[in-house]
Image (cartoon, helix red, strand yellow):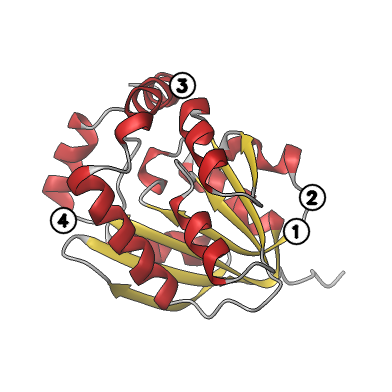
Amino acid sequence: MNMVKRENQNKRFFNIVAGVYDRGIVGKWLFGIIEKTIKEVNIDESSKILDAGTGTGNLLEFLEKENKKLGLYGIDISEKMLSVARKKVRYAHFFKLSVLDINKKFKENSFDYIFVIDAFHHFPEQEEVMHNFHKILKNRGALIITELDFGRVFNYLFHILEPGNQWIYTKRQMRNLFIESMFTIKKQKKIGLFSYITIGTKVKPKRRIK
């Protein structure tokens, strides 16, 4: 299945579930993963933060309650998910935007932190997305990705069965992706039964000596 078709699946699926996304077992699990993710990151006051694949804005809602001085931004391709987020998070800026187009919206060196929580496996062209993240992060800015990992076999099955699932990286594959995308790994650890966090800081490309 091609990338465009999967992205359209994502839009349809998350528009359908937007109204109930925060409820029940899934909502409770997601809130727990968000809290565990935040505990692993020392966020500087007055930082500018992007939540890529923000969904209903749960991460930004949590951050807003903790610190009103943060500059909060969220992007998602589902308008209905964003509609829920806008009602929950008062001071954040939300945009209907694909991760493939973030360089059209945000300037280079714009953000201190980029968070992706349980969304990276839905992103199309994941290597290109990492390149985009690198561009809009400030020098020494941090990329934080919390993802699922069921192991190679079950990752593949989940990829086949879940609507809009582009690809799930194993913990080792994610580490390699960060390094190949010019990020220095600062931390990688398991934070749930099937979830792990990877934190990398932006490495400035070396200038070629002529």
User: Tag 3: Cα neighbours inside 10 Å, few (<14), some, or many (≥20)?
Assistant: few
Q: Nearer the viewer, residue 49 or 27?
A: 27
Q: Secondary structure at mark 4?
A: loop
- Tell which tag, 4 or 1, sits nearer the viewer: 1
Q: Nearer the viewer, mark 2 or mark 3?
A: 2
Q: Quadrant of the N terminus?
A: top left
Residue 44: quadrant of the picture: bottom right
| Mark with earlier residue (4, 3) | 3
* Residue that appears at 57% across and 62% down: 64
Disc 4 marks which amino acid? Gly
Please give the residue where the numbered disc 4 appears in the rendered image.
151
Measure how far apart labels 4 and 2 are at the Cα level. Answer: 37 Å
Q: Amino acid at mark 3?
A: Val
- Write down the residue under mark 3: 4
What amino acid is labelled 2 in the image? Lys
| Labelled disc at residue 107 | 2
Identify the residue at horizontal 40%, vertical 64% (top origin).
Answer: 176
Cα separation, mark 2 vs mark 1, equals 6 Å
- In the image, taking residue 150 as reference, residue 144 lies left or right, namely right
Q: Quadrant of residue 72?
A: bottom right
Q: Identify residue type, mark 1.
A: Ser
Going from N to C along the chain, the mark reached first, 4 or 1, is 1
Of mark 4 and mark 2, the one earlier in the sequence is 2
Q: Where residue 185 sits in the image (x, y, percent)?
A: 47, 75
Residues at badges 4 and 1 in contact (C-beta under 8 Å)?
Answer: no
Choose the circle earlier in sequence order: 2 or 3: 3
Where residue 50 appears, x then y in whole percent?
61, 55
